[in-house]
Each structure stands twice: as structure tokens, then as C-alpha cells.
Image (cartoon, grey):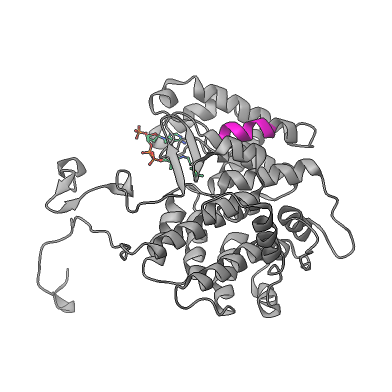
Amino acid sequence: GFDISKLMATTGDTTFDIGFANTAVCKSAITYIDGDAGILRYRGYPIEQLAEKSSFLETAYLVLYGELPTQEQLSTFNDDISHHMVIDERIREMFRIFPRRSHPMPVLSVGVTALGLFSEDTIGFTEEKLDAATKRLMAKLPTLAAYGYKNSIGSPTLFPDYSLSYVENFLRMSFGSVTRPYEFSDEVTKALDVLLILHADHEQNCSTSTVRLVGSAQTNLYQSIASGINALHGPLHGGANQAVLEMLDDIADRGISVQEYVNRVKDKNSNERLMGFGHRVYKNYDPRAAIIKKHADAILRGHDGNDKLLDIALQLEEAALNDDYFIQRKLYPNVDFYTGLIYRAMGFPTDMFTVLFAIGRLPGWIAQYREMQADPTNKIGRPRQIYVGEKERNYVAMGERS
Ligand code: ACO
């Protein structure tokens, strides 16, 4: 009996804003988005320039510290991270207790929480401690992610290799084995580096807001990031890249036509959505999707088994972009529409897609957390509600309840 339309937008002192669609909860100097114009900038630099010219670690430095690093600053940052990539043996052994085939996202979140237990930089919010925790997390997240993956396929883990770049080291820990060295491809290394850059921050999305909300209670950085990882796992957020691939597989397996599928998602009774389409903020196009699309074709053509899914994706995109339902609602492909296809071509199983998103998003989560802790006007996050439950009533004894 609760009729939302009868509620005014503002009730007394409380603004009613489901999903915080119109509520700014902080000031931030990290990421600028203009959803109507399809603009995304980190610290003022357009995403197109960073994707073309920067590297993930350099972009991470920019997001975290506000400026592009000098050569010396970048080398020091790189060295600091390389030397923290190993994780404590007890955490490594912890991975043995998870069931085989555990989804690597919750495993990653547990790994990050455990990391906090093994670190001395969890208490207090001095710049030194936060910076030490920042570098530990940046260094160890790919190691934890690769170990979660190895656990999910029942393979032994590898130690990190300091001589490799951030992305190469992660690829080797994921796909290399003790007996078989990983064969690097410049194309794959570069594409993964670009994908991580595209995910590095995205202002107050669900997982970042979660990191800020949890951190606003002065919860330590590790636990706040673990909460962000859990938020990111949801299929309407980071889990969408996995959901896109499952959708494409489903269309291919059942042999239904693309138009049939589009008709189904338009039917409100189906409760289905065209995964990888639509965005809370971008109502014109997602600039990250435009960058990825350029890489997708180059990486995907020629990889066995992917051409068919890419073709379905291209047909879906075309059908949707010419359909009034999607045009009227301003629904365009988002970053996740093509990323899953690329990740699969690199050899990652669908369960790992969201983990890759988390590795990319880490600098953004940390930068937002640190920005919040450094802000003297920061307050604990505590939204209000509009109560729609029962009025006061008297307790009924057990024997008298109908
Ligand atoms: N397929 C079909 N219809 C859609 C889709 C979609 N993908 N997305 C939105 N709509 C429709 C809704 O049904 C609604 O229609 P109505 O007005 O007739 O009721 C209208 O478009 C507005 O949708 P909302 O859900 O109100 O939009 P919101 O801003 O809350 O949601 C979201 C944004 C969650 C991204 C949504 O578009 C969606 O579910 N997309 C699919 C999942 C996805 O790709 N998520 C990735 C997001 S990007 C990221 O996390 C990196």
C-alpha cells in the first residue's frame, strides 16, 4: 500500500532520493565526469590521452597523488610496489582452506581483510601509515588475485617476479606454472594495461561510495577496500562484465536471434536487462566503451571461439542503438560491454573479470579514502529514511496471536 508518488522529494528536513541519484555526498578533486557530454578526466587529464600515452602505474600515481610523476618519482613508486608484492606465507596458505572453484571475488575480499591483520599500518590515519598501506595494497592485490584464480582452478601458486612490470607479473602469476613459463604477448600486456587505466577511478559509484561510507566510520583502509570489493561484485556494478559474457553465451547456445533477445529485455515482465548497456551517469555514451571498442576488434579477431560472440555483441549494439526503447532511455554500451570479450580472449575465465576490474579500481578507491580522511569537514556517513511501517501497537502474547 505504499505509494511512492505521494511522497514529496523533500519531507521536512529529509530529502528523499532513492539510490542517491541526485545527492552529492562529498567534494572531490580526483575525477571529473560530464555524463551528457561523455567526458571523463582523472585529475584534469582526459581519459583518451591517458589511455593512449600513460601506463597503469603512472595513472595510479596521478590518481593517488594528484600530479603526473617525474621519472624519479615513478621509478621509486614502481620499486616500492615491486618490493611489496610477496604476501605472508600464512596468507598464502589460507588460500588452501577455500573450496576449489570458489568465486575469486569474495576470496579477494577475504585476502584483503587478512592483509590488514598482517600489517602494522592499520591503526591511525597518519600520512605515513596511509601511504605504507597504499603501497602494500597496490603491490599485493594482483598477487592475491592471482592466488584466488589459481585456487579456483586447483593449481599451485607462483611467487611474484620483481623483474617484470606490474601487468606482466600479474599475467605470469595467473597463467604461468612452475613447469611452464608464461609466454608474453605485447598486445595482451598493452591491452590489459589500458583496461586497468580505464577503470582507475569513476567518482562516487557504488563500490567507491561503499569504501567512503565504511571508511567514514574510521574503519581501516584494508577493511574499507574489502567492502568495496564486495560491492563491486554485484551484477549491476562490476559483475556486469561477467553478466555480459554469460548473456552472449546464452544467446549463442540457444541459437535465438539478437532481435528476439532485444525484444525480451524490452518486456518489463521478463525482468531481464541488456547487460553492458545503460549507465547512471553517462546518458550519451561511455567514453571508456569507445576506447575499448577500438582495442576489442584488434585483440579478438583471430582468437578461437571469440569471433562468434563478438559478432553477437556488435549486432546487439546495432539493434539497441537503433531501437526507440534504448534511444528514449538514453541507454548506450558501457565500459563492461566489451571488456569481458577481451578478458576472455586473454585467457581469463568469466569469474576473473570482476577481479580485473578491482585491480584497476584500487587506486581510485584508495585515493577517495585518503581524500576523505584528509578532509577536516568529513563526517560519518549516515543517511536517513522515510518510515513506512506500522504505527505503534501493543505486544500480543503468544497464545493470543491468530
Ligand atoms: N536493459 C534494458 N532496460 C534498461 C537497461 C538495460 N540494460 N538499463 C536501464 N533500463 C531501463 C529501465 O528498465 C528503466 O526503464 P523504465 O523507465 O521504463 O522503468 C530505465 O531504463 C531507467 O533505468 P534505471 O534502472 O532507472 O537506471 P539506473 O540509472 O538506476 O541504472 C544501471 C543504471 C544499473 C547501469 C542500468 O542501466 C543497468 O542495470 N544496466 C545493466 C547492468 C550493467 O551493465 N551495469 C554496469 C554499469 S557500469 C559499471 O558498473 C562499470
Horizontally, residue 294 falls left or right of residue 204, namely: right
Q: Position of residue 31 (x, y in %)?
A: 46, 46
State which image quarter holds ligand 1: top left
Examine the rendering and report whether any part of residue 44 can be seen.
yes
Q: Is residue 294 magenta?
A: yes
Q: Which of these two is toward me, 363 or 394? A: 363
- Identify the image quadrant of the C terminus: bottom left
Vertical position of residue 115 compared to residue 205: above or below: below
Please provide percent x and percent y for residue 162: 78, 64
Q: Residue at x 70, y 77 (%)?
A: 93
Q: Residue at x 44, y 26 (%)?
A: 326
Vertical relation: 273 (above or below) 154 = above
Give the magenta range: 289-296
Relative image position of residue 248 (x, y in whole percent): 62, 36
Q: Image quarter for residue 328? A: top left
How many tags in the picture?
A: 0
Asked whether residue 249 is in view, the answer is no
Figure check: 328 above or below 115? above
Rendered image quadrant of residue 194: top right
| 299 is higher (above) or lower (below) than 14 | above
Q: Which residue does the image show at 68% across and 69% down from the upper left?
A: 84
The image position of residue 106, as x and y in percent, is 56, 64
Work out which residue is located at the far right of the displayed protein and give it: 179
Tell me the chief SS of the magenta region: helix
